[in-house]
Image (cartoon, helix red, strand yellow):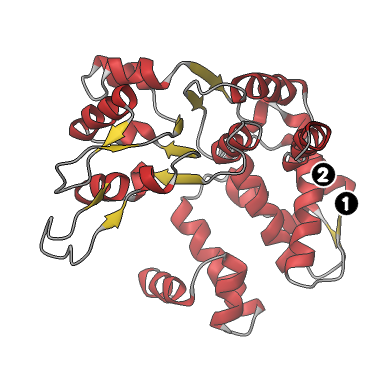
Amino acid sequence: LVKSERRKQGSDRRKHFYGHSEKLEKILNLIEKAAKTDASVMLLGESGVGKELFAKEVHYLSPRYAQPFIPINMAAIPDNLLESELFGYEKGAFTDATSMKKGLFETANKGTLFLDEIGEMPLALQAKLLRVLQEHEIYRVGGTKPIKIDVRIVSATNANILEQIENKEFREDLYYRLNTIPVKIPPLRERKEEIEDIAKEWLFKVCRKYDFAYKSLSDDALKALHDYDWPGNVRELLSVVERATILSDNDLIEEVDLFLESRKCQKSIKDLEKELIMELLKDFDNDLDKSAKALGISRTDLNKKIDKYKI
């Protein structure tokens, strides 16, 4: 791309963020400065604030934008598999290693590797990650030859890393390597100016996704969204809007369609999930495929949840 096109593309990327607020603008300005370098960025904030979206922004605004962006959630992968997932393995490295496999560091070469929930990384693996950051090379599991890599690291956590360091659960030297540029993302309750725009844009996308006639939010519904504290942040807002869009009977979504009162009653996530599954199954006449699609999960996972909740 020529410079003028790159500049336009860079400004257009702010469209990835539906809302507008002074705090969001400050974060995006900081990210834009950081993106021009290869400095490690650590995104700090509560669960659900959209840390992966901000990590993608770092990547897309950087000179690496045309190369891979590879995310990995440390909390989602068992400790015994995490090393081979990151570094790959050689044929014969262990019983099931019938062929060589590249890890995510190699897959992300020349691009960006996003290490989400970095506080969940086992201590033994932290030492290996530190060496990678220092030497810019990896060893596959079972391998003896170093492999040079060129990867930009963006990490994220909702944990109190300083407390983990004090408790000897996270290496201080690794923290300073990853935390060259810290970016604190405020929770949605501190960026309430964004709620209406996010809700309306997501509503439009959900209607298009399910081929619904376009729906809108009533003034009372918008006020309820604004007044709610959003402990689950943007992720919870998107979930509430999608649920209301699917279950509302009319084209105008009212406050009652949001089911926010049930959330204010502090029901457990499991209770809310069970209720949502039961409502969707009823709404779709027990059609598992349609219900699973509405939940954004596979039919197999839906069956597991139905068994788990004895629905």
Q: Quadrant of the C terminus?
A: bottom left
Q: Is residue 88 above or below residue 297?
A: above
The numbered dot on residue 43 is none
Residue at the spot x=37%, y=36% of the render?
149
Is residue 224 visible in the rendered structure shown here?
Answer: no
Q: Relative to residue 229, is residue 14 drawn left or right?
A: right
Q: Nearer the viewer, residue 132 or 240?
A: 132
Q: Residues within 10 Å of mark 1 (few under 14, many from 20)?
A: some
Name the residue located 63 percent from the left edge and 85 percent from the top edge: 285
**Amino acid type for the residue under numbered disc 2:** Leu
SS type, badge 2: helix
Which secondary structure lies at badge 1?
loop
Looking at the rendered image, the quarter that the N terminus falls into is top right
Q: Which residue is mark 1?
A: 218
Q: Where residue 185 appears, x then y in whole percent?
A: 59, 26
Q: Quadrant of residue 161?
A: top left
Q: In the image, residue 245 lies at what x, y percent?
A: 75, 62
What residue would you read off at disc 2?
222
Is 143 on the left or on the right of 292, as rendered? left
The answer to whether the residues at label 2 and label 1 have Cβ atoms under 8 Å apart is: yes
In-front residue for pair 140/96: 140
Would residue 41 be visible to someone looking at this image?
yes
Name the residue located 52 percent from the left edge and 28 percent from the top edge.
45
The residue under the point 49% across, 72% down is 298
131 vs 267, nearest the viewer: 131
Distance from the alpha carbon under mark 2 to that under mark 1: 6 Å
Q: Is residue 142 left or right of residue 199?
A: left
Q: Is residue 285 above or below residue 94?
A: below
Callout 1 amino acid: Ser
In the picture shown, does residue 107 fall above or below 152?
below
